[in-house]
Image: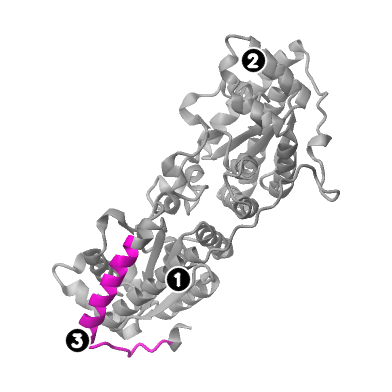
Amino acid sequence: MLETLDLSLTLDKASYRQQIETLMQQLHNLQSICRDKQLPIVVVLEGWAAAGKGALVRKMVQYMDPRGFTVHPIWPPTEQERYYPFLWRFWQRLPARGNLAVFYHSWYTHVLEDRLFGRVSESEIPNLFRDINAFERQLFDDGVAIVKYWIHLSRQELKSRLKHYAEHPLESWRVRPEDWQQQKNYDRYCALAEDMLISTSSGQAPWTLVEGNCERWARVKVLSQMAATLTEALDRLKIKPTPLIYPPQEKLEPTEPDLLAQVDLSKALSADAYKKRLREEQVRLRQLQISVFKENVPVLILFEGWDAAGKGGAIKRLTDILDPRSYFVYPFAAPTHEEKEHHYLWRFWRRLPTVGQIGIFDRSWYGRVLVERIENFATDEEWRRAYREINEFEAQLTGAGYVLVKFWLHISPEEQLRRFEERQNDPFKTYKLTAEDWRNREKWTLYEVAVNQMIQRTSTPTAPWTLVAANDKYYARVKILDTVSDAIERELKRRKKAD
């Protein structure tokens, strides 16, 4: 692929000046339109060292409106960033709707330069390509315009430029030892780049290969392709088809299992048995928290369930004995204005626990296929593709060593009504009961279908659902503690065996 590029292509100064001025005016206008149309733009600049990426960015900045333009130079990950899945730091830098972000190097450094220097094992590469493709497809499906460039140089041109920069008193700082290694291992680096380009060029995010020996030619080609991609993305907004609207599914099809009906809601514990078991399980979890911290294990616990199912009480018993310095509880409500300006998973990526920490989410990304589905906050297309996006997200978490525990607290409609009435009549609990709770109860059959489909489609070997019989709060609390401890112990044993 790369060897077929004609690196002898050039552009004379007069033609360059004429074309570059027209292109930059066009891009300035397109940026303004994208801002008005709330179209987010991601530009990825990759290529050889000294390929002219920095000069290209400087040229773009001269003409673009800086209020909606951010350049992210990607350096080796910080100590904090190494504690998260490798895409975590890029999710933090994604542009809001209507803004443009340029990644000067990007997530591809991990599968290219890190691969060349043995910082990532060959066995990891297929999964990394899979995660990158999923990441870019999710952004594209959410309306992001993605432009990716590989600026290619010949071996001789690379050597000449590195030598020139190394000898220049104001530019020598730019030349890293790794850059000389690119030149020394030119053929190997080319082969790795070919593999990356083939594995990650898709209809949603194709690569543009740029002949870079002539910097004037490279700049014009990059900016021309960028203008074409933005124009195409804006055209897609104009011809976006009318979304399909399906009637709400009020009951499961005969081929769909009723998983909630299989939960034995008669399970219960006596008060004495509860006190004994609760104390045992809390002490067990407190001891495991020490191991979690020492072994740098990230733990994430999700709580979903019916209104009044006892999530708050369960979380309180879960955390009662834990050291508060290494756990946190985050309740997710309706997304803020800032959060709505990004992909719906963005706000959850930002809240992930780091290594050695236990994170507890009261509600989670499953709102996309539950309340957002039922209340029409997400289109049918959006919530239907969310099952795949969620499975991909969770696979990245568990692949990075997270213990991921997912609970659905299940109660009967009769038990929910009893608890609602109890709250209504208790002056210390009335604040817990809202008009929305009553409105959600009227849609019980719709939620029942959505929950069953959610469990069926997102329960995986590495991130299974635990359905908790919660009619009896005593039983539910002990079950949750026991399940969390079991999951942590399994991960600790797996790591010990791997070591």
- The residue lying at 64 percent from left, 57 percent from top is 244
Q: Which residue is mark 1?
A: 232
Give the Cα separation between the discs numbered 2 and 1: 55 Å
Q: Which residue is mark 2?
A: 423
Numbered circles on residues, count: 3
Kind of residue at disc 1: Glu
**Mark 3 secondary-structure assignment:** helix
Q: Does residue 60 lie above or below 39 as drawn?
A: below
Asked if residue 361 lies left or right of residue 474, the reply is: left
Image: 24 above or below 282: below
Q: Are marks 2 and 3 in contact (CB under 8 Å)?
A: no
Which x, y percent locates residue 416?
72, 23
Give the residue drawn at x 63%, y 36%: 488
Residue 22 is situated, as x and y percent measured from the top left of the image, at 26, 77
The Cα–Cα distance between marks 2 and 3, rounded to whole angstroms, is 78 Å
Within 10 Å of disc 3 (Cα), the crowding (few <14, some 14-19, many 20+) is: few
Q: Is residue 477 above or below residue 208?
A: above
Query: Residue at 51% across / 61% down in the picture?
Result: 140
For label 1, the SS is helix
Measured Cα–Cα span from mark 1 to mark 3: 29 Å
Q: Which residue is mark 3?
A: 14
Magenta region: which residues? Answer: 5-32
Amino acid, disc 2 = Arg
Does the segment drawn in magenta span residue 9? yes
Q: Is residue 376 visible?
A: yes
* Image location of residue 8, percent across then percent down: 33, 90
Q: Residue at x 73, y 21 (%)?
A: 417
